[in-house]
Image: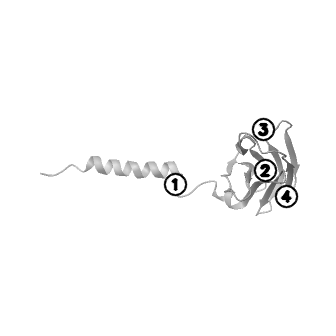
């Protein structure tokens, strides 16, 4: 007596397609952004955060850096493809660094307007994910 193979094959194909869909597939439209832009925000025990930005293509026309969640909002503009900004943070936040995301509004000759978001992390801890949003 022959077994029906339809349901197990369908389930296997469905599972593979679901995994590809959920993981973003083999390619990601944000890969060029990840390869081009380097952003980091490191907290040092001396009471400050070092925020660095580097555009490998050197086609950045302007960047607006903002740190959200602060009592007094921090915002600064740059017109270069790389910078390092030091911001005083005398105390570590009670609820963790996630409450102070770093947002960069980038104008780029090739990519247009790109928003980049990352989080502050302490020295010798893994770098958090960076989110790229081409608008």
Q: Residue 44's quadrant in the figure?
A: bottom right
Q: Secondary structure at mark 2?
A: strand
* Circle nearer the viewer, 3 or 4: 3
Q: Mark 3: few, some, or many residues within 10 Å (few <14, many ≥20)?
A: some
From the viewer's perspective, tell me whether residue 54 is left or right of residue 35. right
**For the residues marked 4 and 2, what is the alpha-carbon distance in whole angstroms?**
13 Å
| Residue drawn at point x = 81 percent, y = 38 percent | 70
Q: Between disc 4 and disc 2, whose residue precedes?
A: 4
- Colour pattern: one colour
| Residue drawn at point x = 68 percent, y = 56 percent | 127
| Dot label at residue 69 | 3
Q: Between disc 1 and disc 4, whose residue precedes?
A: 1
**For the residues marked 3 and 4, what is the alpha-carbon distance in whole angstroms?**
22 Å
**For the residues marked 1 and 4, what is the alpha-carbon distance in whole angstroms?**
33 Å
Place of residue 5 in the rendered image (x, y in percent of width and height, measured from the top left): 24, 51
Q: Secondary structure at mark 1?
A: loop
**For the residues marked 1 and 2, what is the alpha-carbon distance in whole angstroms?**
27 Å
Place of residue 72 in the rendered image (x, y in percent of width and height, measured from the top left): 86, 37
| Residue ID for mark 1 | 25
| Residue drawn at point x = 44 percent, y = 48 percent | 18
Say which of 68 and 105 sits in front.
68
| Residue ID for mark 4 | 83
* Circle nearer the viewer, 4 or 2: 4
Place of residue 68 in the rendered image (x, y in percent of width and height, measured from the top left): 78, 40
Q: Between disc 3 and disc 1, whose residue precedes?
A: 1
Q: Between disc 3 and disc 2, whose residue precedes?
A: 3
Q: Mark 4: few, some, or many residues within 10 Å (few <14, many ≥20)?
A: some
| Residue ID for mark 2 | 106
Q: Between disc 1 and disc 2, whose residue precedes?
A: 1
């Amino acid at each position: 007596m022959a077994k029906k193979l339809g349901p197990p094959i369908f389930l296997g194909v469905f599972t593979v397609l679901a995994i590809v869909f959920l993981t973003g597939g083999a390619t990601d439209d944000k890969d060029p952004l990840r390869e081009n832009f380097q952003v980091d925000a490191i907290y040092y025990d001396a009471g400050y955060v070092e925020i660095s930005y580097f555009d490998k293509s050197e086609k950045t026309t302007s960047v607006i850096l903002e740190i959200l969640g602060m009592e007094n909002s921090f915002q600064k503009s740059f017109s270069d493809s790389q910078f390092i900004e030091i911001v005083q943070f005398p105390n570590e936040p009670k609820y963790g660094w996630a409450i102070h995301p770093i947002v960069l509004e980038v104008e780029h000759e090739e990519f247009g307007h790109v928003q980049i978001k990352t989080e502050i992390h302490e020295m010798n801890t893994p770098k958090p994910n960076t989110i790229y949003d081409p608008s």
